[in-house]
Amino acid sequence: MRYVGDGFAIALRRWPTLVPLTGMIAVACVVLSLILSNALVEVAGLRGARLLHERRAVAFSAYYQHGAASRVGDDTVRYLAEMIDRRAAYTAVLGDMLGPGELDFPAWPEAIVLFGDAVSDLFPELQPGEPTPLPFALRGARFAGQNADALNLAGERVPIVGTLPPGATFFDMGRGVISLDHRIVIRAPVRMLPLLAPIARQEALLRAVMFAPAGEVVNAYVSGCAQGGLFLVPFPAIEYLQRHRESLPFYAMHGGAMLSLVALAFAALMASARSAMRQELGTLRVRETVGAKGLQVGLRIGGFLAAVVLVPVAFLSLFALASAQVVPGTPGAQGVPWVFSALLLACLCMWFALMRDARLQGQVGRSA
Amino acid sequence: MLRNQRLRMNLRLAFGGFFIGILTASLVWSFQGVRESREQAALGMPGGVTVLYTFEGPWVIAAADAAAAREELKTYVRERSLALVISSTGDGRPEILVHDPHGLVSWFPRVAPEDLNSAVSEVYLLKGTYSERRWSESAATPLLPSGVVVAGVISIPPDAGLLLDRVQYARRVGREPLPPGRYAVNTTDETQVRHVLSLLRRMGLAIAGRFEAPPPTVGNVILEGSVAFALVVLLSGHGCIALYWSLYLRERAGEFGAGGRRARLRGLVREYLVGGLPGLAAGAVLGVFLAGLMVAVVGRAPLSAGNLQMLAGVAVAAVISVMATWSTTLYVGSAPGAAGR
């Protein structure tokens, strides 16, 4: 332990150089993990959209009359229900669209209601192990311990048949990737669609996704909804892909810039560590003659590097904690473990390089 | 200097130049991005633009009061030679409302002054939208209000199209109540914006957010957060590389020892600056072009001649800046007394 402390002291004595460098590495690492997290979410969204594009899916962008909920006729709701029955479409009620009387569940998490068997093909995680009759519910991974076995939706009892794997997601072309860890997923039969309150019904209409629909089908649906005051603009999945692909260069460029800064800061750090070790080598060598072993030199270098990465690691952990608290349930600090591992790997490389350096110098010193 | 040593020095210089090249490219790229987003926000209006995001306020406003405020707003915009573009953000129909008495909005058909206060029944479909396709196929327009006439098809600038999401048509502001949404007015003057805000409140609209896009000149784009951050990152990069190089020079400090200052400087310039030029230039140019290539590959957009020209410009800037840093490091490192530190 004493040797590690020695390494710490070597680093602390050089704080005017090391603090700015580790500060830079810290900031760059936090920004990098932020960029990486967002890029990972974006890529997951693109993957979801590609899956829908392969089925030539069409989704809708919604414009509502402000104030009141739309009043779309029952025939349009039935039109969608028939398509869902034929597996030519599916739909979802996302977010807090269910009224207080509609859903009762002890913990009251955000619920997602999904209509359509096509969901099982697109999101295999949302299918319980054995075939289960609809309706049923799956709780998010964060509610794994909860022992409630059923909930009520629109007056109907829905058994909770299982727990989703951690990290399960749903993808919607309007809302993007939705983490299901903090949510409860209800798979409901189409016959329950008309039973929903107007707001939830409107949500089900506008989240509809149709597979390779004929032009007339889309037109009839759009006209039916528009008559009820819900203006839906259809768009194919390829449009989502095109728009969101444009954000990838942003992540690439900024990620590249942060990596460059980290590389430069590490180079400067490595150079100052070398010069620090060289200056301290006198003391180290004296100790070596009185019995200091390679291991002890290694521990000192380890202590030095630990002091150097302490700041970045603290920053990263704070960032991970903060993002977990601010936005529970959204994919937040996914990038942190990656950046963290890369940082440790870089330190390991530096440790080996410095050890080799010390050994070489030790030999030079002895032969001189 | 030995050949081997020169090669090693050039490798170190190329290492620094490479990453500084990437950072320089990223700064220029952020700068371009901000400029483009400013131009997008302007929706084809000249000068700086203020964007106000509004929603229906919780207070109750009598229809007559709201109408009076609306007419006042229209008059104000006309008198100050401004233009107002209102686009839906999900509330109301997928439409854009334009009040442009002086013909400032390039893509919107100019209106005769006597028509400005008439009731509006004409709409212009936006090219490439669902409604335009459906109208040209079957004259059906389910997303348009009943009783309007399609007066034609117009194109909006492609950048603005992305911002406007899936808006289907544009029309003039008439005598109907104005919906909540995105209000863009081409002024950044605080008094004018405040006056517009008070009129919007009197119309029953609450403000959800405000975004200012001053004209994209070099001076005010640099102040934008992302560009300022990229600049700080670039400067930090220069700081790191200067430290890295100066520690390398300290190892070789003995070499600058002999001779008078003038002779020493001359030797330094020849040995280190000219001798290091290949490494610096190759590194910086490689960094800039690699960054450009990465953006092109990730964005699946081939590099155009314009892109290449810009990259070349950025590469020159990067080479000059790393040379400046290297010369400064050399100068400071060779100063009398530096070797002993």
Image (cartoon, coloured by chain):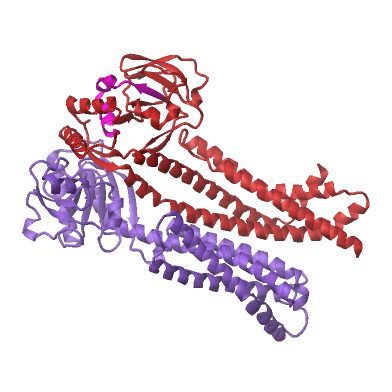
Pick the front one: A284 or B185? A284
Q: For the view shown, which residue lies furthest in the right direction?
A: A290
Residue A6 visible (yes or no): no
Q: At 19% across and 57% down in the image, what residue appears?
A: B77
Image: magenta residue range: A185-208
Q: Which chain is red?
A: A
B190 shown above or below B181: below
Instruction: Give the main secondary structure, helix, strand or loop, of the magenta stretch.
Output: helix
Q: Where's residue B280, x and y in %?
A: 60, 71
Q: Quadrant of the C terminus of chain B?
A: bottom right
Q: Where's residue B171, x and y in %?
A: 15, 51
Q: At 50% across and 18% down in the image, what residue appears?
A: A146
Pick the front one: A266 or A136? A136
Q: Where's residue A291, x and y in %?
A: 92, 49
- From the viewer's perspective, tell me whether residue B252 is left or right of residue B183: right
Q: Quadrant of the N terminus of chain B?
A: bottom right
**Chain B drawing hue:** purple
B195 shown above or below A99: below
A100 shown above or below B137: above
Residue B6 visible (yes or no): yes
Q: Where's residue A290, x and y in %?
A: 93, 51
Number of residue marks: 0
Q: Is residue B118 magenta?
A: no
- From the viewer's perspective, tell me whether residue A77 is left or right of residue A273: left
Pick the front one: A165 or A93? A165
Q: At 67% across and 67% down in the image, what residue appears?
A: B245
Q: Is residue A204 magenta?
A: yes
A293 shown above or below A14: above
- From the viewer's perspective, tell me whether residue B4 is left or right of residue A210: right
